[in-house]
Amino acid sequence: MSSEKKLISFEQAANLKDGKTRQLASEFLNPGLIKTLGLLGFDRVYREARGVVLKDDEGNEYMDFLGGFGSLNLGHNPEVVLEAMQKVSSRPNILHVSLNPFSAALAYNLAQIAPGDLSRTFFCNSGTEAVEGALKLARAAAGKKSIVYCNNSFHGKSMGSLSVTGRDKYQKEFLPLIPQCHSIPFGDTEALEKVLSVMDDVAAFIVEPIQGEGGIVVPPKGYLRRVREICSEFNVLLILDEIQTGFGRTGKMFACEHEDVEPDILCLAKSLGGGMMPVGAFMTTPKIWDKAYGAMDKSSLHTSTFGGNAMAMAASLAALQELIEKDISSESDKKGRYFMERLRERISGHPLVKEIRGKGLLIGIEFNGPGDVLDRLTGGLAGKISEEYAAALVAGELLNNHRIITAYSLNNPNVIRLEPPLIVSYQQLDKVVGALDEVLQRNTSTIKVAFSGVKTALHSLVNKIKK
């Protein structure tokens, strides 16, 4: 390496000033994304994290109610997970020509808690990889090629997962995608029955028990149970994507347990790694696994270099044990009910609030549009703001004025998501309710929120320039 090329050391990186971090990110990462984050003051650096609380350089405390999009069910840096990772630091982390006791143990533990006869597990590194593996497994086991998925769904952004993600915005730049993928409305069992009755080559139907990025959309009661019946009737495999809803998020270990539904394939990720390691997995029955990969010559058709490494498995073993021993699922159920009730008491009557919905500690607040009169008066500006920025502006207000971290959902920018770690306290829940109430009382329309957000953005920009 030329002497002119100087690398940034770990020590230097750990001590980078916010301005320098912002500069490097803008130049070497994703300039458009960094600019978007900066508009509402989201481009800040946090130096410490524990549980629900983060701290910046000045010691200011923030509450994380985004929770890594469901990855932080145990909060930031859970001690029990860190300790488990430290205990395997001298073990071989990646060694494929050997047996890994940690992956074997985790697969066994997952089989004990998974619904039905799901007892074969493949480990990978992310949710989209889990979905990719599930789609391949379904095609190989069923001997059929078509996949049915739902409008407004989100299953990932790699090519296979994107092919069954129901939003044109994420698909159109990458067409053509995987062929023979067909979408239907979410929550509509008649639509599913209709498409399966006219197509004889459907390998699987993939669905989220609750659409997360779709805007925390809860289907009608009995939907999953009827879906299970229809899939069984037409000999179609049911893939449940519990990447975001799994491991206690909705008040049950898995959201499908609310209706006692047993999928054929279950996709997992996010909080499986205890918030410390990227871990994904898909589970299935021995019968389905053996159809696809049971023969020795087919056993290596689907593999992963980093999947099942010792460090990731140690983190997952510790996280799963903590979730079960402390009955975090029940805590999520009780706290979620409390949070929902308090939100509805305080803000459901506000003119900006269209609906508060969710299950457990997966909650979405959808905002109303500005109304036709206001939209005409502002030359369409109000509608544009409401359609694309309302939830982001409220999230900006919560962050910059109350130090509460939230975000909008990818497929519905009008929905703000509240997805805190499941270890959140009732006092912290109350603080968020109070902050939302204050933001909405102070901003009685979308336009007022927008103006407030613009002022906040300008103030943030001025401070960055000064630095």
Image: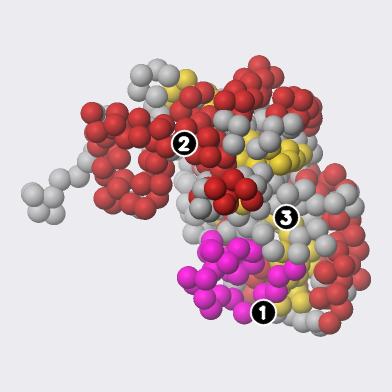
Crowding around mark 2 (Cα neighbors within 10 Å: few <14, some 14 to 19, many 20+) is few
Do tag 1 and tag 3 residues touch (Cβ < 8 Å)?
no
Q: Position of residue 59 (x, y in %)?
A: 40, 17
**Please, what is the three-letter code of the amino acid marked with disc 3?**
Glu
Relative to 275, does residue 435 appear above or below in the rendering? Answer: above
Q: Is residue 198 left or right of residue 443?
A: right
Q: In the rendered structure, does residue 178 fall within the stretch colored magenta?
A: yes
**Please, what is the three-letter code of the amino acid marked with disc 2?**
Phe
Q: In the rendered structure, does residue 194 fall within the stretch colored magenta?
A: no
Name the secondary structure under disc 2: helix
**Please, what is the three-letter code of the amino acid marked with disc 1?**
Gln
Residue lying at 25% horizontally and 37% vertically, measured from the top left? 20
Q: Quarter of the image containing the C terminus? A: top left
Residue lying at 76% horizontally and 60% vertically, measured from the top left? 186
The residues colored magenta run: 157-184
**Which numbered circle lies on residue 180?**
1
